[in-house]
Image (tube, rainbow, N blue to C red):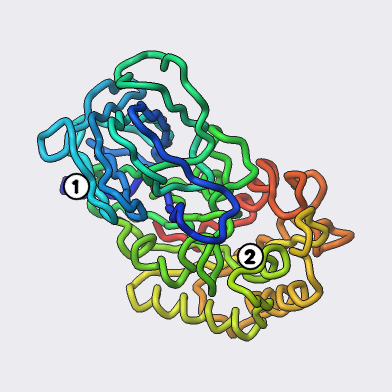
Amino acid sequence: MTTTWIAAHRTAVISPYEPFQLIESRGFSDQTVRQSLRLAGAGEALRIGLSNRFGKEPLEIGGAHLTGDGIDTPLTFGGAPTVTVPAGGELVSDPVEQAVTAGQVLTVSLYLPGDTGLTTFSAVPHDIGHAAPGDQLTAAVLRDAEEVTTGHFGLAADVLAPEDTRIAVAFGDSWIEGAATTPGLDNSFPSQLGRRLTRGWIVNQGISGNRLLTDQIGEHLLARLDRDVLAVPGARHVLVHIGLNDLGMPGYRAHPEPAEVPTAAELVAGLTTLAERLHAAGLSVVATTVGPYRGTVYEGYDTEAGQAARREVNAWLLGDTHPFDGIVDVAAAVADPERPDRIRAEFDSGDGLHVNDAGAKAIADAVDLDLFDL
């Protein structure tokens, strides 16, 4: 059987230097940082990816160690136990020649001897990480550890799998990334959808706060398409949820100033461009309706202009003129039947904008698996 490298875990990253930030990054110095990830698919071997894409200084890695379900091994890079990732750069470890399974949780420990400066990061890690003083790469339990609630260095994993393996990339905002679902349980709606699949799997490239048309939080969806979708090995399908922050962010925390809610026509044009670019690359694209958010606790996010544009965009998506290969009605899956512009109480995380674990499951259960030829 011929095998090839297929993405089994991805983490979309943002810059710590964006002037508009909802969550701040941090740096490390003479510390061991321990973070976990969960593999979406199985393979005969694996390799780990790290990112210094938005770092302003070279990232010195004084050692790396991988553990999890029978794995307890140093990571090497070009045969060396240490490596420096240049500012703006990314790297992939040497292969770890050990079979891994779908759902397997791996822990990556990095010893960072120098001052990293603010790091390339993500708002929603797989689980709570930890940082501890000095080189504790092989410690069973980190001494004097502090919790790290953000993800750092864009942890990624590829597995060596049959070359006909095909996967989907979940691409979009916090509803993709899994904000407000329980850390460590892998309960974002793409992950819960992935557990329904009998073939192939899904990797997550969501960014909380991300927008279709405007940079920050993160590069806007069209700008990051090449790196976060087209460069993902094994990608065949794309599952998109986007638009909430385009509609709500201007009223909540406008950047750049002055900011106005985009029109439905502008969002439709952006979504059409997205579909055209993905189709040109040979990928199929499944879009979702924009989720409900009436009554959110974030002051200024819920505006009449935004709600009107949301209704118009969703009507277009549910009609017969959109360019997508399929539509998932996310809004209907979690809406309050009596007030369909709001999230149902049992699915609401508590902020009126994000779904909880049960809401994410409701979305996953609403997806027609025939949309994904994996």
Amino acid at dot 1: Thr
Identity of the residue drawn at 41% across and 17% down: 142
**Badges 1 and 2: C-beta atoms under 8 Å apart?**
no
Quadrant of the snapshot with the N terminus: top left
Residue 117: percent from left, percent from top:
37, 44
Identity of the residue drawn at 61% across and 82% down: 320
Residue 132: percent from left, percent from top:
41, 23
Q: Residues within 10 Å of mark 1 (few under 14, many from 20)?
A: some
**Viewer-side residue, 249 vs 25:** 25
Question: Where is mark 2, residue-wise?
Answer: 245
Instruction: Name the element at disc 2.
Output: helix
Q: CA distance from mark 1 to mark 2?
A: 40 Å
**Viewer-side residue, 51 vs 271:** 51
- Look at the picture and state if 11 lies above or below 31: below
Question: Where is mark 1, residue-wise?
Answer: 3
**Which residue appears farthest toward the right when viewing the image?**
338
